[in-house]
Amino acid sequence: MKDFFKYLTPGEEDKQWGIYLNVVGTKHTHPDEEYPPKGHPSGYFFNWEKGRVLNEFQVNFITEGTGDLETKDGRFLVKTGSVMLIYPGMWHRYRPRGKTGWAENYIGIEGEAVNRFLSNPVLNPKTPVVFCGLKESLLDCYYNIFELCKKEKPGFQQIASGYSVRLLGSVISMVKNKDFKGKNIEITIEKAKFLIRQNIDKETNIKEMARSLNIGYSYFRKMFKLFTGVSPGQYQLQLRILRAKELLLTSDKAVKEVAYATGFDSIYYFSRIFKDKTGKSPSEFRKE
């Protein structure tokens, strides 16, 4: 894609949506080329000596080259496959290294939804560089956003904001999983998830399963929750309720049969848990 940047003027309807884009762009900076390039508004342009502070959140994906990002918390290496997260109100400066240059893809977003995203503990201004690797899924988000913003057809902000959420969600997921990738614990948790899903029609004893996987229960439970966001027991229950929903909607099985097919020995316990999780009894859910 050719270099370009575009500053957008979101309307009140865009702002009420909860997330909107202010700027998008892509730039290939050649070795020893002046940086940053001229032509940006005063609120965005900066030099290395002074740096800058933005009011928006920027997500900058580096797909070629190497550089440095500096904040008040230190200097961070930015290499191919890195994502720079520039937080609102954070003093910063960055640039490619002269010998390599770099290729960057960036968006600047604001809104109430963005503020909620930034409250996620995974997003930490003290670690503003995340290494994601050259993920096609990330680049696809940027390219879709760029095409939408170039044309500015009615409703483009809403569609582009959806890709922005997908982009940010992908980055958060990569941050959460970086401590697991390629390690034995990741393999163990994937085996556990497989066993739970495979035995969805019966009550799985999580402690016994951990023992069969040669891992201590307390450590297994802690790492499973870090990996999936829920405990092993809740993960199992969510799968069973999901399967129960499918059977209620797609089969003629009686509620009692659905309960047994998803590992519940008591129809009364099944009905109570189902209502707790869905807000409706199995019979009410089936009627809708």
Image (cartoon, helix red, strand yellow):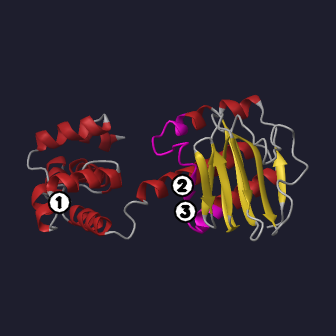
* Mark carried by residue 171: 2
**At label 2, which amino acid type do we have?**
Val
> Could you classify mark 3 by the number of other residues whose Cα lies within 10 Å: few (under 14), some (14-19), or many (20 or more)?
many
Mark toward the viewer: 1 or 2: 2
Q: Is residue 210 visible?
A: yes
**Magenta-drawn segment:** 116-139
Quarter of image, res 55: top right
Tell me which residue sits at (63%, 53%) in the image.
84
What SS does tag 1 mark? loop
Q: Position of residue 176 (x, y in %)?
A: 43, 54
Quarter of image, res 273: top left
User: Magenta includes 121?
Assistant: yes
Camera-side residue of 252 and 192: 192
Q: Position of residue 146 (x, y in %)?
A: 76, 56
Tell me which residue sits at (17%, 60%) in the image.
201
Give the distance between the C-alpha atoms of the residues marked 3 and 2, in whole angstroms: 7 Å
What SS does tag 2 mark? helix
Outermost right residue: 39
| CB under 8 Å between discs 3 and 2 | yes
Q: Position of residue 22 (x, y in %)?
A: 76, 41
Q: Is residue 136 above or below residue 59?
A: below
* Mark carried by residue 132: 3
85 on left or right of 4: left
Residue hosting label 1: 201
Give the distance between the C-alpha atoms of the residues marked 3 and 1, in whole angstroms: 37 Å
Mark toward the start of the polypeptide (3 vs 2) = 3
| CB under 8 Å between discs 1 and 2 | no
**At label 1, which amino acid type do we have?**
Asp
* Mark carried by residue 123: none
210 on left or right of 225: left
**At label 3, which amino acid type do we have?**
Cys
